[in-house]
Image (tube, coloured by chain):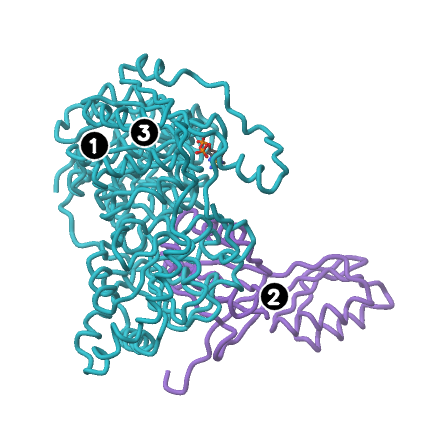
Amino acid sequence: MKHTLSVLLQNKPGVLSRVTGLFSGRGFNIESLCVAETMEKDVSCLTLVTRGDDNIIEQITKQLHKLIDVIKVTDASEGSFVEREMVLIRVKAEAHTRAEVLRVIDIFRGKVVDVSAKSYAVEVTGSPSKIQAVIEILQPIGIKEIIRTGTIAIGRAGKNK
Amino acid sequence: MTTITGAQAVVNCLREEGVKTIFGYPGGAVIDLYDELMDATDLEHILVRHEQAAVHAADGYARATGEVGVALLTSGPGATNGVTGIATAYLDSIPIVILTGQVPTPLIGNDAFQEVDIVGITRPCTKHNFLVNRKEDLVQVMREAFHIARTGRPGPVLVDLPKDLIKAQVKFDDKKPLRMQSYQPNYEPHPGQIAKAGELITQSQRPVLYVGGGVILSDGYQELRDLAKLLNMPVTMTLMGLGSYPGDDDLSMGMLGMHGTYTANMAVSQCDLLISVGARFDDRVTGTLETFAPHAKIIHIDIDPTSISKNVKVDVPLVSDCKRALAELLKWFQNSSSTVSEFRGEAFSDWHAQINSWKEAHPLTYQKDDSDIIKPQYVVEMLDELTNGEAIITTEVGQNQMWAAQFYRYAHPRHFLTSGGLGTMGYGFPAAIGAKMAMPEKTVIDIAGDASIQMCIQELATVKQYNCPIKIAILNNQFLGMVRQWQELFYEKRYASTVMDVAPDFVALAEAYGAVGLRATKKSDVKAVIQEALSTDNTVLMDFEISREEGVYPMVPAGKATTEMLLV
Ligand SMILES: Cc1ncc(C[n+]2csc(CCOP(=O)(O)OP(=O)(O)O)c2C)c(N)n1
């Protein structure tokens, strides 16, 4: 099963390679990985998507915890989280398909970020399934390039928060 | 707060941590540190002959004492030579700090002379490592390094020290209690889990205590002994656990696993409760996982949560320091109602009868005959007898290691130093140097193979220089014996590259280094050679010409169930 793990780490040199080294050394896989500073300058948040049965996810979580620079690991697949990803797609946009592309992008609340005679680059943000959907719909029109950020996640505020 | 050089700060930090001995090898990147050490007469520096040996010696020092061992290496090849030692310590969870020199910070990343990314290289084989890249961090990093090495599940920590920072002026303030936001190991067992474990034990009919190196690392052997005795529970130990429970006690079943005793492996296969304390269900212990302790509920005590349910699903996980968990279990039983005191002793009597019948049917033994050929097992038995089981034994790797594990009865913890996890040939001799430096009053013996000993033989010069008398017992079969045994059993005796009949004359070699060399070619020589070695106040290398194709038995072939043992 797919899991999104949210990992708070000390923002120190080499810390990312400790995480990726753990995954490669122990044969775990990473589907996507995103990392940047948080509100605190010396703490980064790394969001990664991985796959595995409960045992594997348990091992991954524990092994991450064991890294000295890791402060906290949360499984964003448990409990209530909002997941988002952004994608940039360069899609063929010739005279007869331009309107169609724009319509699709509009439905997905995306934006055109670059225009050329033969293509649009569009930006769409949403849940991973929404991103998948927009890609599938644009596919028949002709996608030339896809760049995805990978998933990030934030916990929903509880009633008392 | 004072301002001193980086080198002085490093030395001060070593003092602060109670370090007395450092094992190392100099070079350009650490020349300033060595210059400073020359004046630090309270810190003894042992100049080894190869950096691998420096790290193994620091590791042996740590295993023998429980204190953090320290190695100091120069940048580049000095550091890479140490990697095998670091990985050895990592896999056995041994607390050491390795200080490496590094090229000056402005040159890092430029492929400067003798630059390697040692932090990158050792990331997967250290508990943690640091490249100090600001002089303001130096003192704090040194303190964190020792803290991380010795706390939680111990392990090696490497600190890479760029040359310009060693020369820089740094501020040194008094040590305050360390608090690391992202590193707070848990020592205390959960009371609810203790009660669950206690209840499982009370309900069991056929319990086995399965004990690993964690009991030794946590100094929990007294609690282990008390608990086993109070509840009358049989004990088996992993290679790393040997010495945590006295090998000659009635409750001991000896080692389990690939070369474990028949009794221990049978008991684990039949037990209804396995209490694992500081062990990690290694494949050399379990054989095929599905057949390991198939009828048992499992209690697993370990300080490292990643060890728990990694290989085997457990019923009662107990994340805790082994010593603390054993003490709490003991308390639980001492405070419980009379039903508990009734249950013990009596309830296990059938189980003990069964265990005793296994012990009688297949004791640990070897083929003895009337010839005057030297059996390696006999040599180890004689070492045991003539040292009263009181020596610190280190081992190389291979058959010698297994015979040393099987035929010396370890009465005390920290007396059997062996590379269990990594299986590093070349470990035993330098580790013996580390142990002897820490415990000069102890007899320290490296039980060696003729091939392994050659991997760090150059340290004969080190022991000469520091008057550090080690006894080396080579069980010389002129083979890479353990590999040969696999070839004999599973590769139709095709001895591919395992014949080692080209070797130096070890007696002459010992003498060339200023040690004493003794040779035994007949069984009737063995005792006299050992006696002479033990009474000689110098390093003695004993070359025992043993029966060449002797095997280590029992043996569980790799990938088989532990009950499928090949016996003598
Ligand atoms: C550094 C290293 N290289 C290779 C091995 C693989 N290996 C394991 S046991 C062994 C043979 C050891 O021979 P020897 O030291 O003579 O001991 P014996 O088994 O004969 O007692 C070898 C090559 C190892 N464990 N370590």
User: Is residue A14 or residue B207 the one in the foreground?
Assistant: B207
Neighbourhood count class around disc 2 (C-alpha, 10 Å): few under 14, some 14–19, many 20 upward: some
* Dot 3 crowding, Cα within 10 Å, few <14, some 14–19, many 20+: many
Query: Which chain is disc 1 placed on?
Result: B
Residue type marked 3: Lys
Q: Which residue is mark 2?
A: A86
The chain ID associated with circle 2 is A
Instruction: Judge from the rendering whether residue B40 lies leftward or rightward of residue B253; answer left or right.
Output: left
Letter of the purple chain? A
Figure colour of chain B:
cyan
- Name the residue located 78 percent from the left edge and 60 percent from the top edge: A119
Disc 1 is placed on an element classified as helix
Front one among A74 and B421: B421
Mark 3 / mark 1, whichever is N-terminal? 3
Q: Is residue A104 left or right of residue B509?
A: right
Location of mark 1 (residue): B437
Label 2 is placed on what type of residue? Met
Q: Is residue B469 left or right of residue A152?
A: left
* Residue closer to the observer: A151 or A143: A151
Quick check: is the Cβ at mark 3 less than 8 Å away from ligand 1?
A: no
- Mark 3, residue position: B163
